Amino acid sequence: MSRPRVRLVVTADDFGYCPRRDEGIVEAFLAGAVTSVSLLVNGAATESAAELARRHSIPTGLHANLSEGRPVGPARRGASSLLGPEGFFLGKMGFREAVAAGDVDLPQVREELEAQLSCFRELMGRAPTHVDGHQHVHVLPGRQEHLYVPLLERLGMGREIRSPRTWAPASPPISKSTGPWHCPLPGRKKPTRLTSV
């Protein structure tokens, strides 16, 4: 009896974060190590990343971002429960704490996700192949049912939500100050290193 075929999908997140990261992601795709990418529509290199994805026919999804950088939706024009006083998202832990405290206005989240989806369609000329969340905000307890599932269903993508796995290297990584992932989003005071794969 033959076993069912299994297709391994390896998605590189943060496409559009910065040119150096994007170059590495494209190189990994061309080498066959990565099978798809997730595009940050509010990244420093979003437009060039979208062009790279089109040029190399890379399957591209939306990397919905509610935790870092500036919003692309209505929140960018005024006060929002998603933003700190300087007009940036609250950060990974700040967003999680605001969600846990009930301080995040769900209609504002929905508006931002819709705006990011619209921006993705403008950049790519089509719907995303998948949707996942920057810094795993799509799997916060109780959030996916209210936020991501309706968006996925509207896209005809079902109710599948990516389950993130974080890689822990056996040896210390390259120094945070010199690593190839060391690229700030526009307006960030200091760069951060993301460990999601």
Image (cartoon, rainbow, N blue to C red):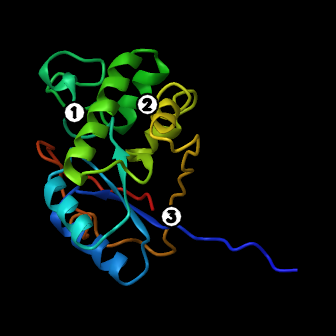
Query: The residue tagged with tag 1: helix, strand or loop?
Result: loop
Residue 9: x percent and y percent?
52, 67
Name the residue at 82% across, 80% down. Answer: 2
Q: Is residue 178 left or right of residue 9?
A: left
In the image, 67: left or right of 86?
right
Vertical relation: 175 (above or below) 154: below
Amino acid type at mark 2: Arg
Give residue 167's mark.
Answer: 3
Write the residue at 39% across / 35% down. 93
Numbered mark located on residue 96 in the image: 2
Which picture quadrant has residue 26? Answer: bottom left
Does the image show residue 16?
yes
Instruction: Classify 10 Å Cα crowding around label 2: few (below 14), some (14-19), many (20 and above).
Output: some
Residue 149 lies, in percent from the top left, at 52, 34
Under tag 3, what secondary structure? loop
Question: Which residue does the image show at 44% across and 23% down from the upper left?
Answer: 99
| Residue on which disc 1 sits | 71
Amino acid carrying mark 1 in the image: Pro
Which of disc 2 and disc 3 is earlier in sequence?
A: 2
Single out the mark in the foreground, 2 or 1: 1
Question: Where is 70 relative to 74, above or below?
Answer: below
Check disc 1: other Cα within 10 Å, few if <14, some if 14-19, many if 20+: many
